[in-house]
Image (tube, grey):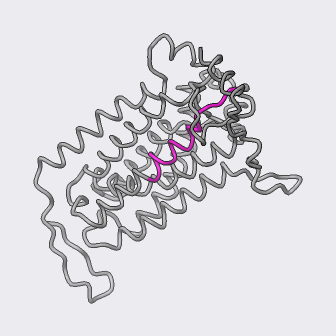
Amino acid sequence: MLSLSAAAAAVSGYQPLQWQSLGLSPIALDLGFFAIKWYSLAYLAGIMLAYVQLGRMIREPGAPLAQRHADDLFFYATLGIILGGRLGYALFYAPELLTDPARLMRLWEGGMSFHGGLIGTTLAIAWVAWRGGLNFVRTCDYIAVCVPPGLFLGRCANFVNGELWGRVTDSKMPWVMVFPGAGPLPRHPSQLYEAGLEGLVLGAVLLFLFWRTRARWRPGLLVGLFGLGYALARFIVEFYREPDAQLLDFAMRSGLSMGQWLTLPMMAIGLALAVRAVVHPPLAVSVQPAAKPGGKTAIT
Protein backbone atom coordinates (compact mmCIF):
# COMPACT_ATOMS: atom_id res chain seq x y z
CA MET A 1 0.00 0.00 0.00
CA LEU A 2 2.86 2.35 0.85
CA SER A 3 4.50 1.69 -2.51
CA LEU A 4 1.28 2.48 -4.31
CA SER A 5 0.94 5.70 -2.34
CA ALA A 6 4.48 6.72 -3.19
CA ALA A 7 3.87 5.94 -6.86
CA ALA A 8 0.67 7.97 -6.81
CA ALA A 9 2.55 10.87 -5.26
CA ALA A 10 5.11 10.72 -8.05
CA VAL A 11 2.39 10.74 -10.68
CA SER A 12 0.80 13.78 -9.04
CA GLY A 13 4.02 15.72 -9.46
CA TYR A 14 5.35 15.48 -5.93
CA GLN A 15 9.09 14.86 -5.84
CA PRO A 16 10.79 14.17 -2.49
CA LEU A 17 14.24 15.48 -1.72
CA GLN A 18 17.19 13.47 -2.99
CA TRP A 19 19.96 13.05 -0.44
CA GLN A 20 22.51 13.03 -3.24
CA SER A 21 21.34 16.46 -4.42
CA LEU A 22 22.51 17.96 -1.10
CA GLY A 23 26.13 17.57 -2.14
CA LEU A 24 27.15 15.84 1.08
CA SER A 25 30.19 13.62 1.44
CA PRO A 26 31.34 11.43 4.35
CA ILE A 27 34.89 12.69 3.71
CA ALA A 28 35.82 15.94 5.42
CA LEU A 29 39.41 16.05 4.14
CA ASP A 30 41.03 13.75 1.58
CA LEU A 31 44.83 13.83 1.63
CA GLY A 32 45.15 11.09 -0.96
CA PHE A 33 46.98 8.66 1.30
CA PHE A 34 44.64 9.38 4.22
CA ALA A 35 41.03 10.53 4.49
CA ILE A 36 39.45 12.22 7.49
CA LYS A 37 35.74 11.52 7.82
CA TRP A 38 33.08 13.75 9.34
CA TYR A 39 32.07 10.88 11.64
CA SER A 40 35.54 10.81 13.21
CA LEU A 41 35.55 14.58 13.57
CA ALA A 42 32.11 14.42 15.22
CA TYR A 43 33.46 12.07 17.89
CA LEU A 44 36.52 14.24 18.44
CA ALA A 45 34.52 17.48 18.58
CA GLY A 46 31.95 15.95 20.92
CA ILE A 47 34.65 14.82 23.36
CA MET A 48 36.42 18.19 23.23
CA LEU A 49 33.18 20.12 23.78
CA ALA A 50 32.36 17.87 26.74
CA TYR A 51 35.81 18.52 28.22
CA VAL A 52 35.46 22.30 27.85
CA GLN A 53 31.93 22.29 29.27
CA LEU A 54 32.97 20.14 32.23
CA GLY A 55 35.84 22.53 32.92
CA ARG A 56 33.36 25.43 33.19
CA MET A 57 31.01 23.47 35.41
CA ILE A 58 33.59 22.33 37.95
CA ARG A 59 34.62 25.93 38.56
CA GLU A 60 31.21 26.50 40.12
CA PRO A 61 30.78 26.11 43.90
CA GLY A 62 30.27 22.60 45.22
CA ALA A 63 31.67 20.66 42.26
CA PRO A 64 32.26 16.99 43.10
CA LEU A 65 35.56 16.81 41.20
CA ALA A 66 38.63 18.91 40.46
CA GLN A 67 40.41 19.67 37.19
CA ARG A 68 42.83 16.78 37.65
CA HIS A 69 39.85 14.42 37.84
CA ALA A 70 38.38 15.98 34.68
CA ASP A 71 41.68 15.34 32.90
CA ASP A 72 41.61 11.68 33.95
CA LEU A 73 37.98 11.39 32.87
CA PHE A 74 38.83 12.86 29.48
CA PHE A 75 41.32 10.06 28.87
CA TYR A 76 39.40 7.10 30.31
CA ALA A 77 36.00 8.20 28.99
CA THR A 78 37.45 8.49 25.48
CA LEU A 79 38.61 4.88 25.76
CA GLY A 80 35.22 3.89 27.13
CA ILE A 81 33.36 5.57 24.29
CA ILE A 82 35.47 3.96 21.56
CA LEU A 83 35.94 0.49 23.01
CA GLY A 84 32.48 0.30 24.57
CA GLY A 85 30.80 1.70 21.48
CA ARG A 86 32.48 -0.80 19.15
CA LEU A 87 32.06 -3.82 21.42
CA GLY A 88 28.46 -2.82 22.11
CA TYR A 89 27.75 -2.65 18.38
CA ALA A 90 29.22 -6.13 17.91
CA LEU A 91 27.30 -7.54 20.86
CA PHE A 92 23.91 -5.94 20.18
CA TYR A 93 23.85 -5.53 16.41
CA ALA A 94 26.54 -7.61 14.69
CA PRO A 95 27.58 -10.66 16.78
CA GLU A 96 29.57 -12.05 13.85
CA LEU A 97 32.21 -9.37 14.49
CA LEU A 98 33.05 -11.03 17.80
CA THR A 99 34.47 -14.00 15.91
CA ASP A 100 36.43 -11.81 13.49
CA PRO A 101 38.87 -9.61 15.46
CA ALA A 102 40.32 -8.09 12.29
CA ARG A 103 36.92 -6.69 11.24
CA LEU A 104 36.10 -5.74 14.82
CA MET A 105 39.10 -3.40 14.88
CA ARG A 106 38.12 -1.60 11.65
CA LEU A 107 36.53 1.38 13.36
CA TRP A 108 36.79 3.46 10.19
CA GLU A 109 34.18 1.23 8.54
CA GLY A 110 31.56 2.45 11.02
CA GLY A 111 29.42 0.60 13.51
CA MET A 112 29.22 2.12 17.00
CA SER A 113 26.57 1.60 19.65
CA PHE A 114 25.46 4.42 21.93
CA HIS A 115 24.49 1.95 24.65
CA GLY A 116 27.89 0.26 24.44
CA GLY A 117 29.60 3.63 24.64
CA LEU A 118 27.40 4.51 27.63
CA ILE A 119 28.48 1.36 29.45
CA GLY A 120 32.13 2.07 28.64
CA THR A 121 31.84 5.67 29.84
CA THR A 122 30.08 4.61 33.05
CA LEU A 123 32.90 2.16 33.81
CA ALA A 124 35.42 4.94 33.15
CA ILE A 125 33.62 7.28 35.56
CA ALA A 126 33.44 4.53 38.18
CA TRP A 127 37.19 3.92 37.85
CA VAL A 128 38.12 7.60 38.18
CA ALA A 129 35.66 8.09 41.04
CA TRP A 130 37.06 5.10 42.91
CA ARG A 131 40.67 6.20 42.41
CA GLY A 132 39.95 9.79 43.40
CA GLY A 133 37.48 9.13 46.22
CA LEU A 134 34.73 10.98 44.35
CA ASN A 135 30.98 10.71 44.69
CA PHE A 136 30.09 8.50 41.72
CA VAL A 137 26.49 9.67 41.26
CA ARG A 138 27.32 13.38 41.46
CA THR A 139 30.18 12.90 39.01
CA CYS A 140 27.71 11.22 36.64
CA ASP A 141 25.41 14.23 37.04
CA TYR A 142 28.11 16.55 35.74
CA ILE A 143 29.14 14.26 32.90
CA ALA A 144 25.53 13.76 31.78
CA VAL A 145 25.12 17.49 31.09
CA CYS A 146 28.12 17.36 28.73
CA VAL A 147 26.97 14.46 26.56
CA PRO A 148 24.15 15.88 24.32
CA PRO A 149 26.39 18.04 22.07
CA GLY A 150 28.31 14.91 21.11
CA LEU A 151 25.07 13.09 20.40
CA PHE A 152 23.94 15.95 18.18
CA LEU A 153 27.17 15.94 16.18
CA GLY A 154 27.18 12.15 15.90
CA ARG A 155 23.65 12.02 14.47
CA CYS A 156 24.46 14.85 12.07
CA ALA A 157 27.45 12.80 10.92
CA ASN A 158 25.14 9.82 10.37
CA PHE A 159 23.04 12.03 8.11
CA VAL A 160 26.09 13.31 6.21
CA ASN A 161 27.14 9.67 5.73
CA GLY A 162 23.70 8.82 4.33
CA GLU A 163 23.34 5.97 6.83
CA LEU A 164 20.86 4.86 9.50
CA TRP A 165 18.02 6.31 7.45
CA GLY A 166 14.38 6.29 8.43
CA ARG A 167 11.43 4.16 7.41
CA VAL A 168 9.61 4.52 4.12
CA THR A 169 6.81 7.07 4.32
CA ASP A 170 4.04 8.38 2.11
CA SER A 171 4.19 11.74 3.86
CA LYS A 172 4.65 14.80 1.65
CA MET A 173 6.48 16.79 4.32
CA PRO A 174 9.26 18.81 2.67
CA TRP A 175 12.06 17.09 4.59
CA VAL A 176 11.41 13.44 3.66
CA MET A 177 14.00 12.22 1.18
CA VAL A 178 15.39 9.36 -0.87
CA PHE A 179 18.65 7.98 0.47
CA PRO A 180 21.23 6.21 -1.72
CA GLY A 181 21.22 2.47 -1.20
CA ALA A 182 17.79 2.57 0.43
CA GLY A 183 15.63 2.17 -2.66
CA PRO A 184 13.59 4.72 -4.64
CA LEU A 185 10.99 5.52 -1.99
CA PRO A 186 11.10 8.56 0.31
CA ARG A 187 12.09 8.03 3.93
CA HIS A 188 12.19 9.93 7.19
CA PRO A 189 15.56 11.59 7.91
CA SER A 190 15.49 9.96 11.32
CA GLN A 191 19.12 10.91 11.95
CA LEU A 192 18.01 14.55 12.15
CA TYR A 193 15.08 13.66 14.39
CA GLU A 194 17.54 12.06 16.80
CA ALA A 195 19.95 14.98 16.53
CA GLY A 196 17.14 17.35 17.48
CA LEU A 197 15.70 15.36 20.38
CA GLU A 198 18.79 13.68 21.84
CA GLY A 199 21.13 16.59 21.17
CA LEU A 200 19.40 19.95 21.05
CA VAL A 201 16.30 19.44 23.20
CA LEU A 202 17.85 17.21 25.85
CA GLY A 203 20.98 19.35 25.96
CA ALA A 204 18.99 22.56 26.41
CA VAL A 205 16.97 21.04 29.26
CA LEU A 206 20.02 19.77 31.13
CA LEU A 207 22.00 22.99 30.68
CA PHE A 208 19.04 25.04 31.92
CA LEU A 209 18.62 22.82 34.97
CA PHE A 210 22.32 22.97 35.80
CA TRP A 211 22.84 26.71 35.38
CA ARG A 212 19.42 28.11 36.30
CA THR A 213 18.17 25.80 39.05
CA ARG A 214 19.55 23.89 42.03
CA ALA A 215 19.31 20.56 40.25
CA ARG A 216 23.01 19.83 40.71
CA TRP A 217 22.50 19.79 44.46
CA ARG A 218 20.17 16.80 44.11
CA PRO A 219 22.45 13.79 43.47
CA GLY A 220 21.17 11.66 40.61
CA LEU A 221 18.67 14.15 39.20
CA LEU A 222 20.64 15.30 36.17
CA VAL A 223 21.95 11.87 35.18
CA GLY A 224 18.50 10.40 35.82
CA LEU A 225 16.84 12.95 33.56
CA PHE A 226 19.51 12.38 30.95
CA GLY A 227 18.85 8.64 30.96
CA LEU A 228 15.10 9.08 30.93
CA GLY A 229 15.18 11.82 28.29
CA TYR A 230 17.50 9.96 25.97
CA ALA A 231 15.55 6.73 26.33
CA LEU A 232 12.23 8.43 25.55
CA ALA A 233 13.69 10.29 22.57
CA ARG A 234 15.31 7.16 21.16
CA PHE A 235 12.21 5.02 21.77
CA ILE A 236 10.03 7.51 19.87
CA VAL A 237 12.42 8.05 16.97
CA GLU A 238 12.85 4.29 16.49
CA PHE A 239 9.27 4.24 15.15
CA TYR A 240 10.57 6.38 12.26
CA ARG A 241 13.99 4.73 11.90
CA GLU A 242 14.61 1.70 9.74
CA PRO A 243 15.81 -1.23 11.87
CA ASP A 244 19.27 -2.58 11.05
CA ALA A 245 18.96 -5.01 8.13
CA GLN A 246 20.33 -7.94 10.13
CA LEU A 247 17.80 -7.26 12.92
CA LEU A 248 14.74 -6.59 10.79
CA ASP A 249 13.33 -10.05 11.48
CA PHE A 250 13.97 -9.57 15.21
CA ALA A 251 12.06 -6.28 15.19
CA MET A 252 9.12 -7.82 13.34
CA ARG A 253 8.94 -10.80 15.71
CA SER A 254 9.37 -8.84 18.95
CA GLY A 255 7.32 -5.81 17.98
CA LEU A 256 10.14 -3.44 18.96
CA SER A 257 13.53 -2.69 17.47
CA MET A 258 16.76 -3.57 19.25
CA GLY A 259 17.27 0.13 19.97
CA GLN A 260 13.89 0.30 21.71
CA TRP A 261 14.55 -2.80 23.81
CA LEU A 262 17.86 -1.33 24.93
CA THR A 263 16.22 1.91 26.01
CA LEU A 264 13.77 0.20 28.39
CA PRO A 265 16.24 -0.53 31.22
CA MET A 266 17.81 2.89 30.67
CA MET A 267 14.36 4.46 31.00
CA ALA A 268 13.65 2.58 34.24
CA ILE A 269 17.02 3.42 35.81
CA GLY A 270 16.77 7.08 34.77
CA LEU A 271 13.27 7.41 36.20
CA ALA A 272 14.31 5.73 39.46
CA LEU A 273 17.31 8.05 39.87
CA ALA A 274 15.25 11.16 39.11
CA VAL A 275 12.45 10.22 41.51
CA ARG A 276 14.93 9.36 44.26
CA ALA A 277 16.67 12.70 43.78
CA VAL A 278 13.40 14.63 44.01
CA VAL A 279 12.03 12.89 47.12
CA HIS A 280 15.29 13.30 49.04
CA PRO A 281 16.27 16.74 50.36
CA PRO A 282 18.96 18.56 48.38
CA LEU A 283 22.50 18.84 49.65
CA ALA A 284 23.15 21.68 52.06
CA VAL A 285 26.01 23.74 50.64
CA SER A 286 28.26 26.19 52.36
CA VAL A 287 30.77 28.03 50.23
CA GLN A 288 34.05 28.96 51.89
CA PRO A 289 35.76 32.20 50.84
CA ALA A 290 37.99 31.60 47.84
CA ALA A 291 40.41 34.50 48.35
CA LYS A 292 43.40 32.21 48.61
CA PRO A 293 44.59 30.03 45.73
CA GLY A 294 43.44 26.48 46.20
CA GLY A 295 40.53 27.48 48.37
CA LYS A 296 37.94 24.73 48.73
CA THR A 297 34.21 24.60 48.58
CA ALA A 298 32.60 22.60 51.33
CA ILE A 299 29.44 20.56 51.06
CA THR A 300 27.81 19.91 54.40
Quarter placement of the C terminus: bottom left
User: Is residue 199 shown in magenta?
Assistant: yes
Count up the numbered dots: 0
Is residue 300 shown above or below 119? below
Q: Is 196 left or right of 246, judged from the image as shown?
A: left
Q: Residue at x 23, y 74 (%)?
A: 297
- Identity of the residue drawn at 68% across and 28% down: 12
Residue 173: x percent and y percent?
A: 57, 38
- The location of residue 266, given as percent across then percent down, is 35, 35
Compared with residue 288, is residue 140 higher up or lower down, i.e. above or below?
above
Residue 28 falls within the magenta-colored stretch: no
Q: Residue at x 34, y 30 (%)?
A: 265
Q: Give, as a single range, the part of the protein colored magenta.
A: 185-200
User: Foreground residue, 250 or 9?
Assistant: 9
Judged left or right of residue 128, residue 85 is right
- 194 to 181, vertically: above or below: below
Which one is nearer the viewer's eye here, 88 or 25?
Answer: 25
Residue ranking furthest to the top: 253
Residue that sits furthest to the front in the current view: 12
Q: Position of residue 67 (x, y in %)?
A: 41, 69
Which quarter of the rendering shows the N terminus? top right
Where's residue 244, x and y in %?
Answer: 60, 25
- The residue that appears at 71% across and 31% down in the rendered structure is 103
Judged from this view, the residue extending furthest toward the bottom is 291
Magenta segment main secondary structure: helix
